Each structure stands twice: as structure tokens, then as C-alpha cells.
Image (tube, rainbow, N blue to C red):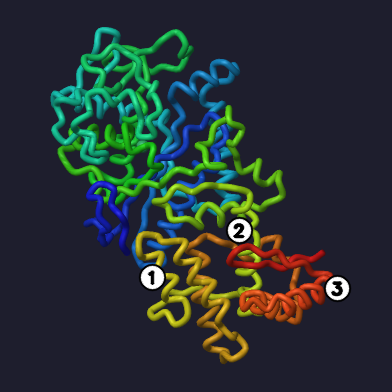
Amino acid sequence: MKLFNTLSEKKEELTPGPSGKFTMYFCGPTVYSYAHIGNFRTYLLQDVLVRTLEADGYNPCVARNITDVDDKTIGRSVRSNVSLKNFTEKWTRIFHRDCDALNIKSPNFEPRAAEHINEQIDMVKTLIDKGFAYAAHDGSVYFKISAFDGYGALSNLRERTLKTQELDSAGKKNLADEYDRDSVSDFALWKSAKAADGENFWPSPWGNGRPGWHIECSAMAKKYLGETIDLHSGGVDLKFPHHENEIAQSECANGKRFSRYWMHINHLLVGGAKMSKSLGNLYTLSDILAKGYSAQCLRYALIAAHYSQQLNFTFNNLEAAKNATGRLRNFFNKISNGAPVQRFAIAEWEFFGDAFAALLDDINTPACLGSIFKVINESTVEALDGMQKSKLAGEFSTLMYCLGLQLDDAEASIEIPEKIQKVAADRWNAKQSKNFQEADLLRRQLLDSGWVINDTKDNYSIEKM
Ligand SMILES: [Zn+2]
């Protein structure tokens, strides 16, 4: 399997580390509100990576953290007069519910920052002992960027390092760290308690306070996955400063390389703009469900574009996703005949080799889906014998597993008769060969039988009237 490594800026073969497992750390949600569909784009593409690694015989092991102590979680819990623990617990539950609906696999480890304060304090102590960090007068501790030569390697920021802690990689002002420090580029490892924090502080060698945001990932990755992990991933906006700071903390504390590969998932735009509450273009899973689309449709729409590209999300994407998942489901019903399909480790791909190869080549989901539909459009299932048919079904089902698409949910309950499917396919072919008169005739015929055809650019779906 090959992946574009953000660190080397090259596509590289993924080789497992000495543990035999393929260890991955994903930066998880800050639990103070609903995760939005841009967040879920990242978690979904990471999920496709995990599933594909599994299907390709790697042994993936994932830690994805829960950030339950920072300015936002503390600020909101204090304002709503709920304890930080109860407040973050509620949003963690909602996050899990949304992940389940979107069929995102649970990580092997899901450590919470507030439950790992000691591990974080230990790492800060090590950094001070080794001369990479210093305590300020107010009891906060800062990482000394000038002490780490490797700083900026991930985001190529070496030359402009000293003024850039103020901005994140999206160019947004980074307000997280407004404390007393030697250099504007130094970032907080430990923040001294302030009145606005209420009861939310912990004792430390530097006085009461709480960890800075970046240190939790370094400390928890080490605890659950070891000093060197195989792959680290997050949204592209985390590349700087968050991931750069994680590298600095981990490599200086452990004296070892932090992560061998880095994967960054690009932004989701809505209507051509970055999502924001003030623009009214911020969507959560619940918003999408309320508009009558299934979580599965959303999953399809969010994974259909390559992870390294920006995805401009529109409701047309969801319509197309609805059609596409409908066609996948019809095909699955046709080849499985309702019988359970055994997924298996596939030694040699006979039907969907190109589609799987696309996933192994830098998780190329659009090429994979294109390939799948090409096979669906061209294959004449009737001509296959029983063995071939079950091979076809097994391969298809393995791919659906990699993409995380479940074809047996509630929407599958409406069965489309074989005859209707045939007329619909004939109509599509007539339309494709620009025989519009014939296509229109067949469309009317379908309407008369109570079925509606929805077309998009590349696909169509059949719906009961
Ligand atoms: Zn992180």
C-alpha cells in the first residue's frame, strides 16, 4: 500500500514497524459541541485507510484521543454550570453516536486528555530537564523552539517560524496561547490556572494549572503506541502548529523519531466557502439527517473525493450519493440473491482488481468508485456460473467493507423488481448513446409502473413513486 507522506512530500510504500502492528495516531475531537461534517470527512477517510490496511493484511492499531480539557471545554462547562467531566461526557457520547451512524470503526484506544494529566506532567518535566522547556514567572511552562533544530520540517516553516505561532496552517489567528513567554513562537506545555478556569486545574511542580493542548497527543501516543509510531494523521489545518509542536515535544522528550508517515486530509468547503456558524453553512450529521438524507449517503458523499483535495460539499453531492448507493445496493442484491456473502482475504482479484488497486494507491477513493461502477455497468451477471458469482459477490463485499458502505440498512427494504431494473438500465444506455426518443419512451414506461428515475452526470437511481 502506498500513501503520500506529508513529511517527505512523496508517495511511499507503507512498511509496518518492528512491532508487527501498524500503529496510527489520529487527532480526535474536542468535545464541546457537535462535530461538523468537515471533521467527519477527516475521520471517514482515516476509517477508509484503516479498513483498507486491514483488507491488505496489515495489522492496524489505532489511538484516537478525546480532547476534554482546553479553553473551549472549560469555558463552556463553566458558563453552563456543569462539571467539566459531565459536560465533556455528554459531547463524547454524541460524538460516538454520530461515528456509529456513519459506520466509523472505533479506535483500539480512545484516551482522554483529562485522564492523563500525570503522563503529560511527566513529559513536561523531561522536556525541562533536557533543556527544551522553561517555566515562566506565572507558573506556565513553554517549549523553547530555538532549542529544537528540527522545528518546522513538517510544514516547511523554518524561515518564518518565529512569527508563525500566531497563525495556524489555515491562516487563522491562533488564540490558544496568550501567555507570558520568551519568544512569540514558544508554545505552552502547561498553563497556569486563571480565574476563568473555575475548579478546573491540577497540581503540578509549577503550581496549579492544566496542560497545553499539544502535549496530550505526544504523551498519549507514547503511552498507547510507543515512542515511534507508524503513522500520524489529522486535518490539514492541524499540520501547523499542532503537529509541528507534537513532533517537537515527542522527539525532544524521547530522543527518537515521532512518526514515520504523516497523512493530512484536506478541507471541506460548503458552497465554496469554509464552514462557519456566521456564514450559516456549518452542517452536522443531524442537520443532514433532518433534510432526509441517510448517514450512509453522507458517508458516500464525504469519501467520494480524494482526501488530498479540497471537497466542495453541496446538496447535489448528497443527491448523487443517494443515487450511487442505490445502484450499489441493487447490484449487491442482484449478485447475492439475498444470501449472506462471505468476505475473504482475496489472493487474486478477478472482477474488482482495479478498484482495490486504486485504494492501495494513496486511498484513491474516486478512482476506486469509478472502477466499481465500470464493472457494474459492464458486467452481465446472468452469464456467470455459481462459483464466479460468489467470487464477484465476495470481492464486491470486501470493497464495500473498505469503503465502509453498508448495503443492508433500512433503505434496502424496498426491492426493485428485476424487470424494472432491466428497463431502467436500457433507458440509461439509450440516453448514453443519445437515443433520447427511446430513453423517454422507457422512462414513461417506468413511470406507468410506479417507478421514478433520477439522473446525475454519471449515474442514475430508481425510486418508488
Ligand atoms: Zn494531536
The location of residue 142, given as percent across then percent down, is 25, 20
Mark 1, other Cα within 10 Å: few <14 / some 14–19 / many ≥20: some
Mark 3, other Cα within 10 Å: few <14 / some 14–19 / many ≥20: few
The furthest residue to the right: 448
The residue type indicated by label 3 comes to: Asp
N-terminal of the pair, mark 3 or mark 1, is 1
SS class, disc 1 = helix
Query: In this image, 130 relative to 261: left or right?
Result: left
Residue situated in front as seen by the camera: 7 or 54: 7
Residue situated in front as seen by the camera: 264 or 113: 264
Displayed-image quarter of ligand 1? top left
Look at mark 1 in the image and give the residue it sits on.
Answer: 357
Taking 29 as reference, is 422 above or below it? below
Residue 22 visible at all: yes
N-terminal of the pair, mark 3 or mark 2, is 2
Look at mark 3 in the image and give the residue it sits on.
Answer: 448
Taking 253 as reference, is 184 above or below it? above
The residue type indicated by label 1 comes to: Ala
Question: Cβ(mark 2) to ligand 1 < 8 Å?
Answer: no
Mark 2, other Cα within 10 Å: few <14 / some 14–19 / many ≥20: many
The location of residue 403, given as percent across then percent down, is 50, 61
Q: Are marks 3 and 2 in contact (CB under 8 Å)?
A: no
The location of residue 121, given as percent across then percent down, is 29, 25
What is the CA distance from the residue labelled 3 to the residue labelled 1? 42 Å
Q: Which mark is residue 321?
A: 2
The residue type indicated by label 2 comes to: Ala
N-terminal of the pair, mark 1 or mark 2, is 2
